[in-house]
Amino acid sequence: MDRGRWGCVIGGDPDRLVVAMRARELGRTPIVVGDDVGVVGDVSGKVDALARIVRVQERRTVLRRTADDTDPFERVVVANADQLLIVVALADPPPRSGFVERAMVAAYVGGLQPVLCLTKADLADPDDFVSLFSDLDVPVVMAGREQPLEPLLDRISGSLTALIGHSGVGKSTLVNRLVPEANRATGIVSGVGKGRHTSTQSVALHLPGVPTPDLTSGDRNPFGGWVIDTPGIRSFGLAHISPVDVVAAFSDLAVTAEQCPRGCTHLGPPADPECALDTLTGKAAQRVQAVRRLLVAIATNETW
């Protein structure tokens, strides 16, 4: 999106790009990258052609955040993504678990599969950091500058994947490796407005060589292989998310949590001495402790 104009692909075909404006009848209905929309008017894609967005379909998944934990206004960052690729450098800057945990919370609650993507593995051993999230069964891929992309491509091909990470972790470098023509620093968003795209807004990029099924095919993910690059951020506010939302995202814990007393924060003793999650054992109990670390991350606002 640029200056009130949206770049839309017709039928999921990246070669059928049209420029559209929001129809007056939509009012201030938000339209974000990843949205499925209904478009009418001139969809030829010719220079100076302008279509109208008249409908925004119900979103399958939503990645939301707030500016901080006191901000009542939540922002939809990306719609309909299948996965959230959380890009983290193992050094320079050093990794901090707080941001990763908060991004995971937003992914779980929004219906996305979080994936931990590690860069700069030549500067530090990843094992200790990865072990922090082992009980959550989060997929981990290595994507340093000198490492092959095939494991990552196997993970994201055929999906709509949003990328998120702090500035300086190598996210833009990774995007340029995945989509060489992206030219994230100075690339012009073809046909959308007259401005130059920078990393201050989200943009969807099609993965070269990955087929894109038509919207009418009935495919679960009509977009095929796409990545959505989001701006580098300093914080990830979760004012809109409660402990109940987090636990509900884990089906194996949600049923047990129904037995908790009213007002239970699921943090366990001493805050919640009667939390039903403490009755779980084995792998489920390990997952409880991992989820509780996510809840603590929400409460402490440790993001940098």
Image: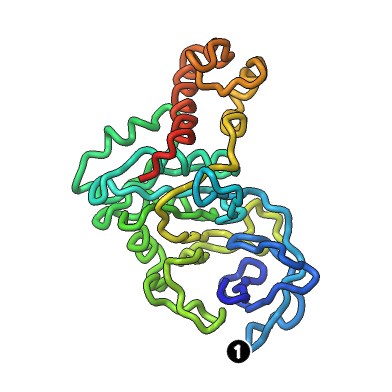
From what the image shows, is residue 266 above or below residue 183?
A: above
- What percent of the width, then of the height, locates residue 30? 67, 62
Q: Residue furthest left?
A: 123
| Residue identified by numbered label 1 | 47
214, 186: nearer the viewer: 186
Quadrant in which the N terminus is drawn: bottom right
- What percent of the width, then of the height, locates residue 201? 49, 66
From what the image shows, is residue 14 above or below residue 93?
A: below
- What percent of the width, then of the height, locates residue 165? 40, 52
In this rendering, the count of numbered labels is 1
Q: Residue at x 56, y 42 (%)?
A: 239
Q: Residue furthest right?
A: 25
Asked if residue 287 can be seen in this view, the reply is yes
Q: Tag 1: Cα neighbours inside 10 Å, few (<14), some, or many (≥20)?
A: few
Q: Residue at x 30, y 49 (%)?
A: 89
- What percent of the width, then of the height, locates residue 6? 62, 73
SS under mark 1: loop
Q: Is residue 213 left or right of residue 299?
A: right
Q: Residue furthest bottom?
A: 47
186, 46: nearer the viewer: 186
Quadrant in which the C terminus is drawn: top left
Q: Residue at x 30, y 57 (%)?
A: 168
From what the image shows, is residue 20 above or below residue 102?
A: below
Q: Residue at x 35, y 59 (%)?
A: 174
Image coloring type: rainbow
Quadrant location of residue 7? Answer: bottom right
Asked if residue 16 can be seen in this view, the reply is no
186, 273: nearer the viewer: 273
- Which amino acid, mark 1? Val
